[in-house]
Amino acid sequence: MSKNSFLRGAMVLTAAGIIVKILGGLNRILLSRLLGGEGIGLYQMAYPVYILLLSIIGAGIPIAVSIMIAEEAARGHYSGVRRIFRVTLAFMTVVAVLCGLALPFGAQAMVHFGIVRDARAFPALAVLAPALTLSVIACCFRGYFQGLQQMTPTALSQMADQFVRVCTMLVLAWLFLPKGLEWAA
């Protein structure tokens, strides 16, 4: 990768990171205005569990995939690049779906055993399963494009992911607020 290409990729990822942080901050402000202190407290019981699971399941995926893809691409073995991506994507899809299916049961256990002290946090924990599944699968795609030194798809993916997450959270919180604070959170 040339120096100019490297700098361009770094600038694209930096700009995307700034936009993602702004969207995240905006989300926190709007969500706290919508849910209030108690609702944010319920949300904060679930969100760290999501982040922890995402870190455990998907933390090294983009790096590992990008390294393997970059090595194969440097050798000119593009069939190997596709094979690595397909195998990784298939494996991580299975892992992500299994973890997504297990999360509601794990949420029930966390509430039952007192890891999460307020039972009203159960709906917030259970509803994170699809987000966890999709985020882990997205990690595979990000690693693939990073391995090919294409940072724009990664940046666009991060921004789209955050935008969809923020919009979904705010819309669903607003829609479920009449059902109760635990459902809105």
Image: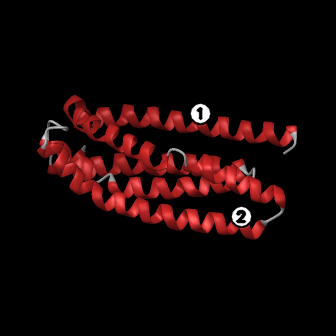
**Which residue is found at the position 54% from the left and 52% from the top?**
139
| Secondary structure type for disc 2 | helix
Question: Can you say which quadrant of the picture contains the N terminus?
Answer: top right
Type of amino acid at the residue the image marks with label 1: Ile
Number of marks in picture: 2
| Secondary structure type for disc 1 | helix
Are the residues at dot 1 and dot 2 in contact (C-beta closer than 8 Å)? no
Earlier sequence position, callout 1 versus callout 2: 1
What residue does disc 2 label? 81
Residue 18 - label: 1
Residue 181 visible in the current orientation: no
**Which residue is found at the position 24% from the left and 56% from the top?**
104
90 shown above or below 75: below
**Which residue is found at the position 15% from the left and 36% from the top?**
117
Name the side, left or right, on which 80 lies relative to 104: right
Residue 11 visible in the current orientation: yes
Place of residue 176 in the rendered image (x, y in percent of width and height, measured from the top left): 22, 51
Place of residue 70 in the rendered image (x, y in percent of width and height, measured from the top left): 74, 53
3 shown above or below 81: above
Number of other residues with Cα within 10 Å of mark 1, as a class: few under 14, some 14 to 19, many 20 or more:
few
**Which residue is found at the position 86% from the left and 37% from the top?**
3
What is the quadrant of residue 39 in the picture?
top left
Name the side, left or right, on which 79 lies relative to 53: right
Name the side, left or right, on which 153 lies relative to 23: right
Name the side, left or right, on which 112 lies relative to 155: left
Residue 115 - label: none
Type of amino acid at the residue the image marks with label 2: Val
Number of other residues with Cα within 10 Å of mark 2, as a class: few under 14, some 14 to 19, many 20 or more:
many
